[in-house]
Amino acid sequence: MTEKRSRSSGSQKPEERNEHESAPIVEDEESSGSTVGSLISLAILFFLVFAFKHSVLDANNIPSGSMIPTLKVGDYLFVNRMRYSLRIPFTNVEVMRIDNPQRGEIITFNPPHEEGKQYVKRVIGVPGDRIRIRNLSVCSSDLKLKRALQADYDCNLSPYTKIPVIAIIEYKPAAETSEERDAAPWQTFALTEMDGVKARQVLTDSDDAEVFHPDLYENPSAAELPVLFRAQTGKNEHYFVEWSDPPRPDGLCDTWETTGCVIPEDHYFVMGDNRDDSKDSRFAPVSYIGRERILGKPLVIYFSIDWRDQICYAYMRNFGSFQDPGAPRGFALEDFPPEEQQKYCTDLDSRAAMGSETISGYVIRTLFYRIPRMSVRWKRIGTFLE
C-alpha cells in the first residue's frame, strides 16, 4: 500500500509541476502584449504631439538680432501654424489657405536659400504693391517724422560726424489696374523718433552689442549710434531701430530708389525690425517671399532669457586679449559689468559664434559660463505679438 501510494503520489507531482510551470508562460504572453500595446500607444502619442507642433502650434526661439527690439535674442515664441494655411503634418504641403498675411504682421517663413530653416520678419509690402526704399540721413529735410525732444545726435555738427541713416519705405498699394496704382501718390508709415533714454531702455538687454549706445563702449567714437523709431505699419504699431548706412539692396529691381519695384503676384516683401542687421527681402537670395513659403504667425513670448552670448562674443572680439584682473575692461553694463564679462566670457563663446563648438564645449560653456551670467526677462513673458 505504501508502495502504491508512493507511485500514485509520484505520478501526480509531474502534473502539478507542469501546471505550475505553464502559468508563467501565459503571464509572459500577456506581459509581452501589454508592452507592445504601450509602445504603440506611446508612438501614437509622439506622432500626435509632433503633428500638432508642426501643423497647429509650434514653439520657436530667437537666435539672432534681426527683429530687435520687437523680438530679442533668447525670446521663446509660440507660433500659430494654422493662421494662414492648413498643411499636411510633417510637410509644408498646403491643404487649404485660411487667410493671407496683412501689412505690418510678423510672420515665420522658409527662406528660398535655406530650406528647412525658419525666418521671422515683418510684412512690409503685399502682392501688387509698388514699393521703393530711400536711404535718408536722419537729419534730411525730406524725412517726415515726429522728432525726438532729446536726440543723441546733433545735425549742426561737422559734416564728418557720423549721422544715422534711415531706410524709408514708400509704397503705392495694389489697385484694379497698374495704371491706377502708379498714378496714386506714394504712401509711407507714420514715424515717431524716440528719445535716447527710451532707446537705451528698450535696446540694452537685447544681447546684441551692435545696438548698444556708444556710451556703453570704451571708445564711443568707434561705435554706431542706434536710433529707435515707433512706426504705424498697417494696423500694427511697433518699434524698429536704425544705426548705420545699410548696403544697397541687390534683390530688387534697378529702380528701387526712384520709381520703385512691383511685388509679384502671390509674393510678399518682408523686413526685420533691426533694419541694419537683417537678411530680408531687400537682399538676394531672400528677395520676395512666395505665399507657399509662409508658415505661420508668432502669437506670444512664453519665455525669455538673456544668455548674453552675443555680448560675450563681442567682448572677446574687442577686449578678450586685454584682460586685466585689476582693471577689467568691457561694455559699461550695470547688470553685467566688465568684471563679470571678464569672468564669464571665454574663447568658447568665440568658437560657438564661428560654428566650431563641440558638444562637450557647449556643455561646459552652458554649465560654467552661460547659466551664471544669464538673466530672465520676466517682463517680456506673456507679451502678445501683433
Image: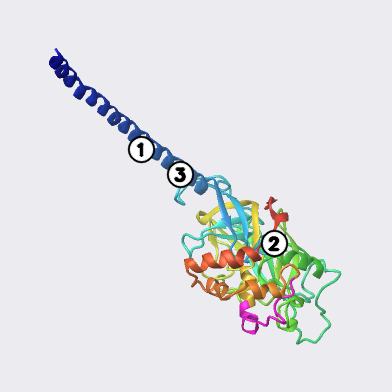
Q: Which mark is residue 36?
A: 1
Q: Secondary structure at mark 2?
A: loop
Left or right placement of residue 297 versus residue 293 in this view = right
Mark in front: 2 vs 1: 1
| Residue depicted at x 47% and y 52% | 92
Q: Secondary structure at mark 1?
A: helix
Q: Looking at the image, is 198 positioned above or below residue 222?
A: above
Q: Residue 289, percent across and down? A: 54, 60
Q: Is residue 156 visible from the viewing direction of this image?
A: yes
Indicate the quadrant where residue 171 lies: bottom right
Indicate the quadrant where residue 326 lies: bottom right
Amino acid at dot 1: Val
Q: Secondary structure at mark 3?
A: helix
Q: Looking at the image, is 200 positioned above or below residue 238?
A: below
Give the mark, 1 or 3, whose residue is nearer the N terminus: 1
Give the mark, 2 or 1, whose residue is nearer the N terminus: 1
Q: Looking at the image, is 19 positioned above or below residue 351?
A: above
For the magenta stretch, what is the residue range? 316-333
Amino acid at dot 2: Ala
Q: Which residue is mark 2?
A: 184
Q: Quadrant of the N terminus?
A: top left
Amino acid at dot 3: Phe
Q: Which residue is mark 3?
A: 46
Q: Residue 196, percent across and down? A: 80, 70
Compute the Cα span from label 2 to label 3.
54 Å
Front residue of this view, candidates 366 and 237: 366
Mark in front: 1 vs 3: 1
